[in-house]
Each structure stands twice: as structure tokens, then as C-alpha cells.
Image (cartoon, rainbow, N blue to C red):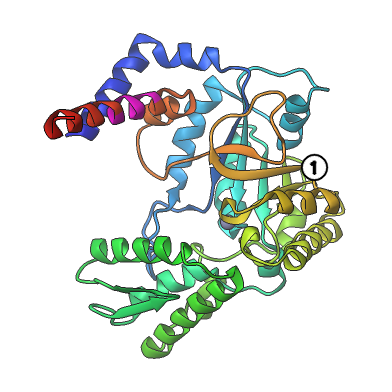
Amino acid sequence: MRYCLRQLIIVVMRWLGVIRLCQFIRRKQVVILTIHGVMDDQNNPVWKPLRPQLSRSKLEEYLRVLSRRYRFVSLSDAVEMLQGPKPMQPYSMVLTFDDGYRNNFTHALPILRRYNAPATFFVPTGFLENARPFWFDRLDYALQQAQVNGREVKVGSFTMCLDSSNRETLRESYKRLRRTAKKQQMSDLEFLREMEQLASQLEEESGRALSDIQEKDDWSAVITWEQIRTIGNGDVSIGSHTVDHIRLSLVEPEIAHEQLARSKRDIEIHTGKPCLSLCFPNGSFTDETITLARECGYLCGLTTKEGLNCVGDDIMKLRRVNLPTYGSVSELLARLCGLSQVLSCIKACLMRSKLGQTTGT
Ligand SMILES: [Zn+2]
């Protein structure tokens, strides 16, 4: 009900021109969108990830509206505008794709080209060298193949019980597992080991593993160097997402340096172009990571912090907005112009004052 009310407010705001006005006020701030996989609308006959995925038709729907309100620019142009040498073009928007899924190339690229939208694909180079699924896809698949209802799983000091009574409860269990496991105090290498171990144990029980079908699987397959070389056209740039999709703030500086330097070098060897942009996996970085990244020769860094970017902002900590996998275009526009956040603040204030009244404070 509350969600419907919020939707109604947003639609009315759009109709009254408030969203346009907010966009006009923020026209000199650069919007950078984050996208991951882009999939078919039809159900994959083999499996469907529990994690929500953006469909081709949804991406097309978003780009159709956004292309009328924003100007798609490349990341390098946006960085030059934010740094000053290039004059800021109003309503600039950059599209970025994280994780280097093959479907970015096969499914998203044709849509991007229909709208003349340049993009940057951030690839974790180790997965291109040695094709294998990401732990989160591997575990997603494994949880759906094995009998896991009522099972206790342990990651670090955290234990939880899985509920696979139906797809929705399993989705919630998996979401909680990912979220809580990531908060455990451990090095990222140890974390990855534990998650891969859990997936491997489930694979043994079911006799089925995502790696067996990955090459033919549009959900989880990773792009190859050969496909990257065939992109041509200059409208897609390749940025680093480290070698092993490592959370850089949770490893020793030597490992972080190795991940940054090696991925940059591999991208430059395979594309023949300088790799100047870096996207921090899971938005994980420290000031030391940024110093290391600068030493390696990166010009800009992209985070998972939500927001827009103004001239003079630190280009090693660029903010982005996640392109939702579902929801209305009006909701997205409200989010991009900051109206959504204002509504959330108003709601939080109203809740606080209501709570204050009931507790008598
Ligand atoms: Zn990532």
C-alpha cells in the first residue's frame, strides 16, 4: 500500500513537471549508471538465478526514455568534464557494466548501439583467463540443485538455517546468506575460499555444477578476450574489475597492488589500449587502495556509493546509480534527479515523529 502511494506521488510529480525541474537543477552533474547482467525475457530452460536480473526489454525501455532526457557520453569524456578541461555538457550520462558477463556483449551491446550509447565494461581478468563462474552464481545454482531445506550453513562465526520450501523463501535465504557472510570479519581470500567450499559441497551432493554448463549458459558465462577484440567501433571501453573480483579493502596491500597492476596490464595487452578506469568490486576500497591505484596508473575509480558527480569531485571515488532490474521508469527518473531520496527522507522523518508520539518522547 505504502509502495503504491509512493508510486502515485512520483507519477503525479512527473506529470506536474517536478521531475523535469529537479533534472534541470542537477543538469551539470554527471549520472553514472551501474548495470550487471542483461538477459532474455524468456525463461532459460535450464535454470534461473535467484538474484534478480535485468531483462533486454527492460534495458530497452529504460534507454528509450533516458535517451530523450540525457546525453549518453563515454566515461573518459565524463572524466574530462569533471576534471575541467572539457566544458560540462548538461544532462551527461555514462553507462557502466560490472563483472564482464558475456551477455553484456551478446544481449546488451545491440541495444546500446540502437541508442548510440557508449559504455564501459569492467572485467575481472582472471575469469577471462580461466573461465569459471563467480562464487555468487555458482552458489546460486548449487542451492537450487541440492536438497537444502532446513540445512544449517556456517560462514566464519555466522550460522543460519536455509529455507527452500519455495523459490521465494530460498531467494530470501540466499540474500541473507550473501549479505551476512560479506559482513564477517575475515580476509576476502578466506571469504572466497569458504563460499567456494560451500558451493563445492552442494555440487557434490547434487552431482550438478554450474561450471559444467557455463559455456552454454547466458546467465553466468563471462566474456572472452576474443569477443572483446571483436567489439571494435570504439564505443565500448574496457576497465579493470581486478583479477579475481577481490574486495580490495579486505586483502593485504601487496595483494591489492598485484590485483590492480596485473588486471591493468592484461587488459592493455589484449585490447592494445591504455586501461585507465577501475571499478572497485563490491565498492570496497580504502585510501591506501586509491594510492595504489594511482601508482599503477589508473585515472579514475568507480564506487558503489549512490549519487551524482559534480565538477571538482574526487574522480577516484565516482558515485553511481544502480539501474534497477524492475520498477517503473518514473521511479528511476525520480531516483536520478534526487526526488526519490527526498521522499525517503520525508518518510523517515514521518516515521520518527510517529514513533516519538507513540513512545511519548
Ligand atoms: Zn562486481
Residue 265 picture location, percent across and down? 84, 60
Q: Quadrant of residue 111?
A: top right
> Residue at horizontal 77%, vertical 41%?
234
Whether residue 109 appears in this view of the structure is: no
Secondary element under disc 1, as helix, strand or loop, is loop
Identify residue type, mark 1. Answer: Leu
- 239 or 294, which lies in front? 294
The residue located at (70%, 65%) in the rendering is 243
Q: Is residue 116 left or right of residue 205?
A: right
> 262 above or below 5?
below
Let me know if residue 346 is in the magenta part.
Answer: yes
Q: Main secondary structure of the magenta part?
A: helix
Residue that badge 1 annotates: 299
Residue shown at 60% from the left, 59% from the top: 102
Magenta-colored span: 342-348
Residue 171 percent location from the top left of the image? 31, 62
The C terminus lies in quadrant: top left
- Residue 55 lies, in percent from the top left, at 43, 48
Q: Residue at x 73, y 56 (%)?
A: 228
> Can residue 8 be spotted in the picture?
yes
Please tell me how crowded label 1 is: few (under 14), some (14-19), or many (20+) other residues with Cα within 10 Å: some
Horizontal placement of 326 versus 86: left or right? left
Q: Nearer the viewer, residue 303 or 145?
A: 303
Image quadrant where one finds the N terminus: top left
Q: Quadrant of ligand 1?
A: bottom right
Query: How far across and how far down the image is residue 356, in percent?
Result: 19, 30
Residue 280 lies in the magenta-colored region: no
* Relative vertical location of residue 260 with respect to residue 29 in this rendering, above or below: below
Answer with left or right where residue 227 lies relative to residue 173.
right
Q: How many marks?
A: 1
Of residues 108 and 181, which is closer to you in this image? Answer: 181
Above or below, comparing residue 315 to residue 183 in the picture = above
